Amino acid sequence: MSVYKVSCLLALLLSLYFHSSESEFIAVPQTLLFCSVLGLKVDLNQLKGIAVTDVGSSPQVIWYFPEEELPDTIQDRFAVLFQTKSKWKQEEIMPYVVNVAVSVQNASLLLTKHSRVHTVQGIKYYSSKHAK
């Protein structure tokens, strides 16, 4: 198993057992002896489709949220996504949509159909079309 795959597994385990801040998420593995010996590093990109971050909270929080546990129907999936988080960046929501879409282009169309797009300082955010 490659060092990258082991790092991804470690990132998954950390997200499963700890609701942690981003700095704690990255710092904890560095304190473990086997991580420093093997040169394992974790980052938030390893958690796409596995965990969600809440940047609005202080400190930022990470929690386990696996894509495969979401409903298979598109409307139900979007309902769960927007109940979990009211506003998603494109790179955050895409891993949760692409597996129910035929292609990445189709995933973008699904996002357009089932959400509202807001652009703030050049960053696209998606929120529920039916939010009050």
Image (spheres, rainbow, N blue to C red):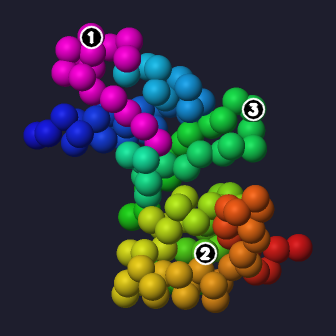
Q: Closer to the N terminus: mark 3 or mark 2? A: 3
Numbered label attached to residue 58: 3
Q: Residue 96, position in %: x, y?
A: 48, 67
Q: Amino acid at mark 2?
A: Phe
Image quadrant for the N terminus? top left
Question: In the displayed structure, does residue 117 sit left or right of residue 61?
Answer: right
Mark 3 residue type: Ser
> In which quadrant will I find the C terminus?
bottom right
SS for tag 2? Answer: helix
**Horizontal side of residue 22 vs 44, given as left or right:** right
Q: Look at the numbered disc 3 and give the secondary structure of its residue.
A: loop
**Residue 90 magenta-highlighted:** no
Tell me if residue 108 comes above or below residue 54 in the rendering.
below
- Identify the disc placed on residue 92: none
Q: CA distance from mark 3 to mark 2?
A: 26 Å
Q: Is residue 84 above or below residue 70?
A: above
Q: Sequence order check: which comes first, mark 1 or mark 3?
A: 1
33 part of magenta stretch: yes
Taking the spot 50% from the left edge, 68% from the top edge, the residue there is 94
> In the rendered view, would you say 126 is above or below 62?
below
Q: Are marks 2 and 1 in contact (CB under 8 Å)?
A: no
Q: Nearer the viewer, residue 70 or 100?
A: 100
Q: Residue 54 falls in which quadrant of the image?
A: top right
Kind of element beneath mark 1: helix
User: According to the image, label 1 marks what residue?
Assistant: 33
Mark 3 is surrounded, within 10 Å at the Cα level, by few (under 14), some (14 to 19) or many (20 or more) other residues, namely: few
Q: Residue at x 70, y 30 (%)?
A: 59
Q: Residue at x 37, y 17 (%)?
A: 30
Q: Which residue is mark 2?
A: 78
